[in-house]
Image (cartoon, rainbow, N blue to C red):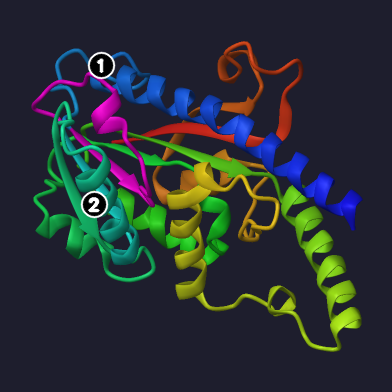
Amino acid sequence: MAAQREKAKASTVDQLSRIPVRTRYFDDFLLRCLQGKEQGAASNEPLPRQVVLLGAGLDMRAYRLRVPREVAFYELDLPVVMEYKLKILRSEFADRKPYCVVKYVPSDLCKDWKRDLLAAGFNPRQSSVWLLEGLTYYLDEATCRRLFQDMRSLTPAGRASWMCASFVKEALVRKLRAQSSSSSSATSRGSGESSESARPIADAQRLSRQASENAAGAALRTSSSRKWPPFVFGTDDPEKFLKPLGFYVTSVACLGDAEANYGRFAAPFRHTMYVTAFAG
């Protein structure tokens, strides 16, 4: 039991050590887009001034990055997550102001989130930048496809918009699923009861809730007793996955590659990918 606890603790620490690199990678991508330096930008087009964060959780980019004041951040997550985030902002950051406009949009990504985004003032006729950080692998494939299709429907034809998303490979999903199944079976045999984590996850609403919960609390989970939500979807070819949905991949970087390293890792993690693409 002690060995299992140490292994779980090491796994959690290792996972948390990768989050700053992912965050920095997404930061750099966003700033390039807002400065007109990302691939696909045209010198005769206005710079994008709308940023959409799907599954935003406790994201603080609007408070950290010195973006132009005319930029508008649209942060979407479940109502319970948004409520918790605003409570934290009011209690812990009351003296801090964001560098730009921030619109908090309580919404469920498995429902009509487009309506909520449009109601918050998002303009689909203008260019935009979309960030899906630590989200796609907590959604089933069908839900993930619908999400990108809906995103594409909100980007203007003939004008570039950009997105950055993290993906994992199929092999990692299979590996974690097998480990979860093995662990759950052992728990069931020991307790004589069926484990909740052993039940198949077929409900998209629950998947969305898990994704948002992860986005909101990942950086806070340092206890080895906390379990990460299961990975559900992976792809070995993000370009093939995204192209039919209207997004054209410009780069795929594995965590730890030269462009996604920042001096943190000696070797890349081939199962985790950061994918940038444009639509237009």
Q: Residue 85 in the image: x percent, y percent?
A: 30, 51
Q: Residue at point 25% right, 53% down?
A: 87
Q: Residues within 10 Å of mark 1 (few under 14, many from 20)?
A: some
For label 2, count other residues whose C-alpha is less than 10 Å away and answer few (under 14), some (14-19) or many (20+): some
232 lies above or below 3: below
Q: Bounds of the magenta span?
A: 50-71
Residue 205's place in the image compared with 255, above or below, is below
Q: Which residue is mark 2?
A: 86
Q: Amino acid at mark 1?
A: Gly
Q: Secondary structure at mark 1?
A: loop
Indicate the position of residue 227 as horizontal and vertical percent values.
66, 59
Question: Left or right: where does residue 50 sit relative to residue 241?
Answer: left
Question: Which residue lies at the image location 53% right of the left edge and 40% below the top edge?
Answer: 166
Vertical comparison of 269 with 235: above or below: above
Percent position (x, y) of residue 1?
A: 90, 58
Find disc 1 in the rendering and name its residue: 36
Compare residues 122 and 246 and report the one nearer the observer: 122
Residue 114 seen? yes
Q: Residue at x 16, y 30 (%)?
A: 49
Name the outermost residue toward the bottom.
Answer: 192
> Which amino acid lies under the numbered mark 2 shown in the image of this protein?
Leu
Q: Which mark is residue 247?
A: none
Name the side, left or right, on which 265 lies relative to 82.
right
Label pair 2/1, CB-CB below 8 angstroms: no
Distance (Cα) linking label 2 and label 1: 31 Å
**Image quarter hosting the C terminus:** top left
Is-magenta flag for residue 70? Answer: yes
Q: In the rendered structure, does residue 172 fall within the stretch colored magenta? A: no
Compared with 222, 16 (above or below) is: above
